[in-house]
Amino acid sequence: MKYKILYTLLAFGIIACGCKKTTFDEASKGEALGAFAVTAPANNTMLVLNSATPNKAITITWSAAKPGVNTAPTYKFVAALKTGSIEQPIVEFPSDNGGNATKLTLTQKQLDDALKAKGIADGAKAELIWRVIADNGSIKVNGDTFNISITRFGDGVSNFILYGPVSSADVITINPILTAQSLNFKWQKSFAGKAGASVTYKVKFIKPDGSFTTPLFEFTSNNSGLDSNLSVSYKDFDAALTAAGLADQSAIAKLKWSVEATSGTFTKFSDYTNDVSILRDVNLYMVGDASEFGWDNGNPTYMYRDETDRGSYIYTGYLNAGDFKFITVVGSWDTQYGNNGSNGVSLKAKGSDPDPGTYKVTTAGFYTVKININAMTFSITPYSTTGATVYPSIGIIGNFNGWGDITAMSKTAFNPHIWMITQIFAADTELKFRIASGWDVNWGSAPTNKEGKYGKGVRDGSNLIVKAGTYKILFNDLTGDYIFYTK
Amino acid sequence: MKINYKNILKSVIVLSVLAGTGTGCKKFLEAPPPESIPKEVALADEAGVKSVMNSAYQIVGGGNMFGGKIQAINEMLADQLEGILFNGDFGEIYGRKTSVFGAYKNDMYQDMYQAIFRANTVLENLDKATTMRDNLEGQAKFIRALSHFELVKLFAQPYGFSSDNSHLGVPLRLNTAINAGVRATVKQVYDLIIEDLKAAEIKLPEVNGGYATKWAAKALLAKVYFQMNDFNNAYAYANQVIESKKFTLDATYSLRFSEAGSAESIFQIISTRGAYEAGGELRTQFRSDISLPTMKFTSAFYASVNTSSDVRKTWFNAVKYPGNIVITKYNSDRFNVPVIHLTEMKLIRAEAAAENNANLDVAIKDVNDILNRAYAGTKSIPSNSSAALIKTNARFEHSIEMAGEGNRISEIKRIGARGENVDKRGSVWNCPGFVLQFPQGEMATNTSFQRNPEGNCF
Amino acid sequence: QTGSLVGKVLDEAGLPLPGASVQIKSSNKSTLTSTDGTYKIVGLNNGEVLLLISYIGYQPKQESVRINGNTVANFSLKPDNQSLNEVVVVGYGTQTRREVTGSISKITGDKLTSIPTPSFEASLQGQAPGVQVTQGSGLAGSGSVIRIRGIGSISAGGDPLYVVDGIPVTADPFIGGNRGAMNQNPLATINPNDIESVEILKDAGAAGIYGSRGANGVILITTKRGKLGRPTINLSTKYGLSTYANRPEFVNGPEWLQLRQEAWTNDGNTGLAPLPGGLSWAQAEQNNTDWWDLLTQTGRSNDQSASFTQGTEKLKTYVSANYSNNESFLRGNSYERYGFRTNIDVKPTSYFGASVNIGYDKGTNTRVNAAWGGGLGDAMSTALPIYPVYNADGTYFSGGANPVRNVDLLDWKTKNQRTLAGLTLEFKPVKNLSVKLIGNIDNMDIKDDIFTPASLRNSTIGNANSYPVKVFNNTLTATANYDLQLTEKNKLNFLVGAETQNSYRNLFTNGISGDANGPFSKDKESYNKAVANLAANNALIYYAGSNKDTFRSLFARINYAYDNKYYLQVLVRQDGSSKFGPNNKFGTFPAASASWYISEEDFLKGNKVISNLKLRTSYGLVGSANFPPGQYYPQFQFKDSYNGNPVLFPTNVANPDLKWEEGRNYDLGLDFGLFNNRISGEISYYNKKTTGALLNGGVSPSTGFPNGYVNVGEILNEGVELSLNTVNIKSDSFKWITRLNISKNRNEVLSLGALTPDAVGGGTNDTRIAIGYPIGVNFLVRFKGVDPADGLPIWLDKDGYETKTFSLDNRVPAGKILPDYVGGLTNTFSYKGFELNTLFTFAIGGNLYDGSAKRQLGIVTDWNIRSDISDRWQKPGDIARFPRLTMNTNTYSGLSSEWQYNSTMFLYDATFVRLREVTLSYNLPVSFANKLRLQNLKVFASGMNLLTFSKYPGGDPEIARDFENPQDRNLSPNVTYLTTPQQKSLTFGLSTSF
Ligand SMILES: [Ca+2]
Ligand SMILES: [Ca+2]
């Protein structure tokens, strides 16, 4: 009895308090899974499936979701109609490698088939939303949802690549006055997806930061667009550049080119684009027994140029008695400038043209030779070296060598005033020409020509600004003329 | 039953008298603490407003701001300190992975806003001011701008992080209202800083008894524009300050942090013996003549100053504590703390000129003035030096001249925003951890407060 | 009239009961026994008389005696624990137990002196249901955290109101802040030997009369007064020894080096790990210092007290003097106290009486640093076993923490003087009306004197600090009490009153400091220089009237009783306070309570089983207003200077709506006595809902302010209390009594406005406030375990999924500092003159967070490492409790710093049971005592905290650490941070009276 009452009282107490308890959840629901980000394709991508390339891959890529502990997730790609819900996808593909990869590779046909199975008509554009879902067995992490429009198979052209000219940092120098020389572009032939359809090509050119949707200019390929190559004469190419606003022939025209193939309503660019740099310019080199290296067209005498007139070429220095003329390409006799017979200028524009005549030096000595290939004028006058200092050493000094000591240039016994060096600059640099020690004798550029590749040096002038690269540098201490030839 | 009402009445009267000692005088329940005075008394006249203005300087110069914490935190974030032994809050900051906690950082944050609160209190009570009205307005706006500037540099990605600077900055506090913090964009913050400083530039006098002057406002404008990589304005304002000829370069480096003060100081925290001894936190963290301080420099940084002719070697001691390189700038009991000085103005003017590719002769002279002092006349750049050469030299000297003054991280971020990564510890200039985390109190009071992303600098 | 009656009144053990009443019912003759228990009534007629012998706390006895000349009659009375006539002190008066309608627990003074707790309130542990007492550390003079029926405050103080002899006394533990990692406890100045009883008012029915200050409960302390009878002197003497109750274990020097090397190697480094303290490995290997051992000692205490009591109808006197000195187990730490008290009651006429109370205490606390402040805290943290105490040349090592040096050299004394005094004048102008005028003061003079000698501060001259504070607190009360007997069964009692209180402090805000050659108390010259120097710099800031708090109230209470069966009480109090904002200057607090003696009803009268059954209930509004004054209006302060000019600045976030926290308290209880009260006890249910709980926070730091007071929270406390007293065995020579009390409280935060858990907290604790959880929830990242593959920790993210990336964003409520059940179990065995008393106290449920363990068991830094690190991962495949050692926070992905390593890895079950007291006493036979001309003589031995049972490996599981502020005190009991454990002690004593 005693205890009955006791227990009754205890029960009273417990009931009175209710049995509410504060609980803290310590249970694990499995492993966590980090977020991930889709890297391709971009949101709002428009994808036109190409009936000519059914095996072409479409890839969707994303970063890996970090496992909470150890378990890597599996991924799948899902897509739904934009008018539907992403929670009820119409298309579902596990990622590559059985869902383990952070990438999904589909052929165009696989995707086309999947859409076709959902009733999307041939050639029709489907507006879709899609996402990637990661799942580690305990938790699903959804990636962001993106838009994409996909046009199903209709017209198509097969993939093709460009053959040439191949991408190169080398500058193709073209002489803009020549009509017989051509730039030649070639690419792989492309085939139409639809039976019986033909493919036509256009070659399009853009600036490096431009877009092929608005090219600078374009050419229809040979044979009214049907051939997979294009030939354009130097003169026509110069005209196209000028028409596109690149009138300055002295500037290197850096371009990208690509080819657009068309079949029916389907157009497609080549798989890659190529870079091409064009300089509409002429280098002149002196050859002949009057000059230092004789008739060796592989080792001519480099001409200096006038910074104010790019058609004007100069040489001030020693000449033997004998003949000389000019070539435009080291090692080639194909194009030449020489005597027209009356100490004027005559051009040999191509290999099959006749050679021009030579200029004569009757007495060995110092001369200034000037030739202007625009005005087609020539002159040669003796030059007095009386009082000219013969420097024991001259070199270049600048950021590239820490402005400490000069990097010495060399000269030959033939001409003690012409200094030459071939130098690699790893980074953009400033420099000056200077004697071995002290700043008493140094040459810089005119303040207005700090970035020029050639010009007349000025004592105590401005620092020259030179882009990184490899140069053959010439400096004439008589005239201060300098010139940087790109190797 | 008989009740003697008369007696009850008597006792009730006694009670009411007693109670009356309380209720009769309502004042009894008004018990303002004697250490405090009510707002309406405190801000009754100009003297009160001036004293509140003065209280803002007390914060700006206090341990949580330019008394040392701003410098210490900025240095820890940057790349000149040797930090492998840092732990706790310092480890977080040095590790470029701060959290929402960490009192060292959070106290700095709160005090920066307390300085702003005090400046705003002044601005809201300018009507009490008479002769000093413009002066006080200028000072309050200067302090408000200075604090917002330090905040936005530390708690947000730098100017230029996004093309239109629409990325989030810090809460802008333009009045004394007590409400939840909301982040303004970096553009809005810089706009306000410039607006405040341009007002201060007009309102402040040229000489102001130790308080912010017209020149301080202009100098800060130069710093702000420089931080924005706006070199035209940076040049213009630095040029005005330098050409005022009010400030001269100290002949010796020991004067920069000295009790006598530096002739270079354009704005400084004034130390008063026994009453307000500025720079306590600088001494705590950097002072090296008594014991090994927490802040030590890397050998790589030391190598840049340890050249035969560099006079500034005396700023460092690599011998006293073997294996440790410590700074000696702060080795005295008392000193004024220059917040903006002429050396920095000259370096800004030189670099801005180089960036503008104009006034290069002025820039070359600035650089050579600095070089001449630093290398005792043994080093200079040629008179026709290019802009690039000027820039290279200005940046290099900047990193040495301002060592330990909390400036380097601003340079890493500013130059970073120009596309160059110069952090010697290898972080990308805009990695999240370079930006401090806001104190948890911001998120606790505003659930939609946007936190900074965490860490990931290494 | 030829007869007389003489004899003795004794208790059941045969000891005299002084002051017992012997009344002859047929006539009006009565007398009281004297101190030896004897009485004498003369002038009696021979023949049979009916006598009524009564004594408070004992069952009254009626007996017939036949007078025949000089007749001798001895009586022995039996104690009556549930006596309904027991006098209970209530607010502004007393009631009999029968009349009480509220919930009140009474603890008699003797329970407070049996164990040598650092302060009397710690002795309340386990004594009363619904009262949770968490004792602080074993530091001499430290305080306890007391919570009555849970906690309804967040940032305002959650402590009960302490009232000593009608004076609401100063009990603020933050007068000296948290200097040296200890909160000075003003209650330590109250001498437990002077306490007659402690009444704890728990519900609105009882505490409601204290209005805006009653919500946390009220603790009424009544000091001893003169008793009727001839002059008697009581003496008591005690000596004790003490040590720590529990301690954490740390690895020794060689082990520490090995662990550091392991961490270094784990991190992929080669060679020897760098060492802290500027030591080479060769030097470090020579040392193996046991700092704990060097800093502790066998504590010694002695406690002497003497009192004198005397009483006649017109004059009653109680005078006492006492001395005690408690040298704790911490070397250099003691609390020495002198105290005097005089309580006098005079009653010259039937219509006028007066009482004077004067109590004075002086305590000198010789301080040592603790916890984060150093001392034993260093021994648990940065004083490494590889550090020596002395350098080779005999000087103190100073390359790292050296707490021995600090204890040896630092001279720190805190002196408290307290005067509690009061004068009561009572008038009885008419029958049944009593008017009282009462004036009281409670003044304290606190001086904290710290001297750091030159060698300790690496300087040429020492430094002294002094923090003098004077605390003034006076109350003026007037009450009128009128009894109205309407009919024989209907009785009414009216109380009306008015009260004003005014308290303030005079203090130097920043103390006084300066160069000195000794403590300022001794080196007056340096003191004068320091004062002059500070004054010259505008830095000597003295405020008279600081913390001023004025308070005025009106109150009324009506008690109605019907037929000893039904009792009803209605009361109301109106409080006005200088703390309240102008929009809420006055608060009104009504409460009603009632009780019903079911056992008095006919259907239970004479029931064999139920001897007493009482149902009681109450409902009312009470408030709590433990927050600093002056917070409601925008304050500006002058402080120091800048650039030589004055500085005036805003100090707070003003809130004109600021007011008390309001509690709506409901109580339902059942008191019962069964089998002639062999079993008795009570069960109570309560439900307390606090609204407008004060939060000092929720302010965006970009305002420039860290916090501001707002009435924002809603908190529920709901619970059940049970107390049960059973007389298990009762024979003439042997008796066994058991007393059990247990209470369960459920606390839940119902609302926090729009704020998140991080809006409060941070700072020194890692507890927070979260809706749906109790106050002081441990807000932590959940630790799942260690990955056997790589030894890295696995966490649960906030959704409960496992991750290896630590993030503060994954903090969730993971534990609570509040226990589910607290209580005490007392067993008393008596045999002849021997008595064995044991008290077990316990707390069941709840969590303990070890804030130091994250440094002792986490990243290897320059901290000591606990021995439980042995259960750690060392190689792939290891199943371990702790992850791989590292010196680099980056090893544990996502961890920003070792300070942010807060997780359930360091959260423990807080359940503990401890043998709080075991006392063996022997009362020498009266006959023997009398031979020594003594009335009685008692010897005893008592042990405190001899056994502790707990799952916590880190030391003492009962934790009230040093706190920064009241909010910390509410949120962070059971959060330890290098906290000094409690003491374990053995005390021997003797008491006598003559
Ligand atoms: Ca000592
Ligand atoms: Ca404890």
Image: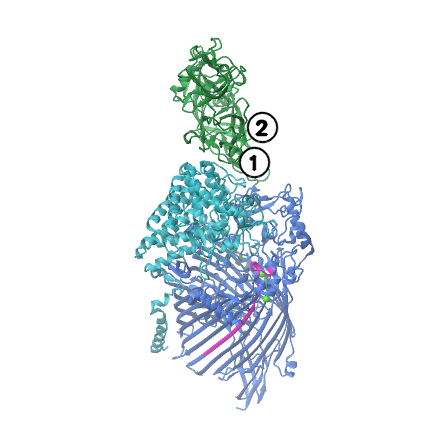
Chain under callout 1 = A
Q: Residue at x 53, y 88 (%)?
A: C42
Whether C158 is drawn above or below B73: the answer is below
Whether B131 is drawn above or below A286: the answer is below
The amino acid beneath tag 1 is Asn
Q: Closer to the N terminus: mark 2 or mark 1?
A: 2
Q: Is residue C269 left or right of residue C103?
A: right
Report which colour depicts chain C. Answer: blue
Which disc is residue A97 wearing?
A: 2
Q: Find the distance from the CA under tag 2 to the CA under tag 1.
A: 15 Å
Chain under callout 2 = A
Q: Answer whether residue C366 is magenta in the image.
A: yes
Which disc is residue C150 wearing?
A: none
Which disc is residue A136 wearing?
A: 1
Instruction: Tell me where the magenta segment starts and ends, as one range.
Output: C355-376
Give me the chain that's cyan: B
